[in-house]
Amino acid sequence: MNILAATNPFIRFPGGAKFSIGFLGIFHTSVGSLAIGFAFIVTVLQIVAYVRKDNRFDMLAKRVQLWHVCIYNIGTINAIGLVFALSGLFPQFWSQIFVQFFWTMILEELLFFMLATTLTLHYFFWDTMWGHKKLHIFMGALLTPMFFLQFFIINGMSSYMLTPGFAEGQVSNWSGTAGILGWDKLAFYNPTFLMLTLHRTAANFAYAGFVVAGICGIWLYRAQQGKIQSRYESGGRLAFKVAFTCFLLLPIIGFFYAWVLKYHGREAYDNLMIGRGDVVAGGIDWWWVKQLIVASMIGLGLVFSRRASKSKDEFTIPMPAVYVVALIYLLFYLGMAIQMTWLFFWGSLAAAVLAGMLGSHLLNHHSGSGRAVFILMGILSFLTVCLGGYVREASRPRFISPSGERIAGFNRIPAYENIYHPEERAGDLRMNIVRGTPPHAEDLPARPDRPDIKPETVEDLVSYRCISCHTLERVHLYKRSDWDRVVGRMRAYGMRLTDEEMQKIVNYLSDNNTKEDSPEFPGNPSP
Amino acid sequence: MSEQIEKVTIADGDTQTPDAHEEEIDLYPLREPSEDPRWAVRTVWVWVSIAVFLLLFIIVLLILGLWYD
């Protein structure tokens, strides 16, 4: 069976491949992001508790860390399922990614191990380390840089899929010519890597903080005693303020993220900023829906911060900073309105004002307690994380053309341009955010030229094609009769070969790299 | 009748049983370091040392990758 020529998917999955990956991915994002943020919030709570000798914060930190242990396990198991599904449904693409970023993935695995061990020790030694509290807090604080590094690595890979640092027509790093696979400016440290990492990090801290506050809000409804209420009220307020501070950083980082996307990931930028009809399901543009929710969060957070700044509370966010960021959001909505439709501006403004009025009412109704606002923000931040993750992935250029034509095999990166054109969809909606080409766009540093490698001999062919994905040791491990099947399988995995080249390689390997008496390579190899 | 008694009991339980954590809230139970189990402290020290070393190692790799690869 010729897999490349098949008109139907090789593997059928409930809901389809896109849906299944989308579901698993969003589930993973919502759980994994929470775990990353929890680590940071736990450390903040523990430090505040230590400085003030106030056990309320420490008890809340311990409870959050217990949720963290649960969430971490769920997220990790889910990640394994996600990798299984990706590898099964998009084997060629993912085998390339895993080869390209082999050492990256190994470091990621090491960090998983470090995180699981540190998290487990930190939670289960909580009560045995009261005489070494600083050491215990320090161990917990190690989780945040560990998570950040793990995030750093996964974002290097995911941003590479959108904005690889090499240009079309150049020999890509897929060829495996780099010293250490993937660790360079063309791959891992690609143009959008830093801003994606920073934006997601701040967003995760905000998300986890709002969720902790939301759970405190739920416990506030349930708590009967004054002391218990005081614990959740204080803890919830602290988590909310830490979260809202991180939330305020997002539009500033987001501006620079959009800036690099505009020059290095134009299709995704257009899809997000002016696209309609692509990142949608059922006629709804989820990017817009997310912005409406963000506007509501600004309204709620602004009202809560104003109220909190009047009290002599432990920590207050300077209100000028809140107003400045609210103004930045307003300008963003204004810009979007000018480019697209004023409906966006008025909708966002209405969402912010209505949410602010609701927040004010809820705070009055509960005598200043933020419990209802905490819960509301927890839910809204969960929705923004899900929607944000979805639109980010959905805004990527397509692997399948709008007409449904399958693009199988071959190098995905050069194929981007051939597969998807924003003009096809955007039509007259396409507008330039910057009118014309900005002068400095011409002065961008040229990408380094790569040698145009052309195989001249059969040895060259074997060398260039085979070591793109694996070492050459294994070519000695097959019998003469295997080579036709093995090379055919490699071709199905994505090796670019003409029929003539394939025949040359099969003949060469059969004649020169065969041990007639060697057994099959143990363990059903995938050379 | 027995159903009524059961209802009252549940209601009482909700409103009158003190939370198990309430007593602990007033305390921040720092204690002498010697009171911590030695095996636990040693385990944590060993792991923290390994973790810090590995973190530094990974960071150095990332920086070297940026400069030299």
Image: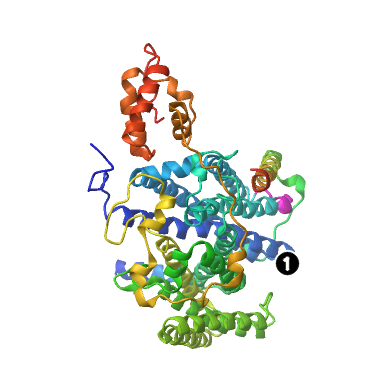
Stretch of the chain drawn in magenta: A128-135
Is residue A254 or residue A423 the one in the foreground?
A423
Q: From the viewer's perspective, is A84 left or right of A150? A: left
Query: Which residue is found at the position 47% from the left and 65% from the top?
Result: A266
Say above or below: B27 vs A289: above
Quadrant where the C terminus of chain A is found in the figure: top left
Circle 1 residue: A52
**Quadrant of residue A283 within the rendered picture:** bottom left
In terms of secondary structure, what is the magenta stretch mainly? helix
The reply to whether the magenta stretch includes residue A468 is no
Could you tell me residue A313's position as x and y percent?
A: 68, 78
Q: Among all residues in the image, which is located at the extreme top?
A: A517
Q: Secondary structure at mark 1?
A: helix
Could you tell me residue A229's position as x and y percent?
A: 56, 73
Could you tell me residue A495's position as x and y percent?
A: 39, 38
Say above or below: A248 vs A507: below
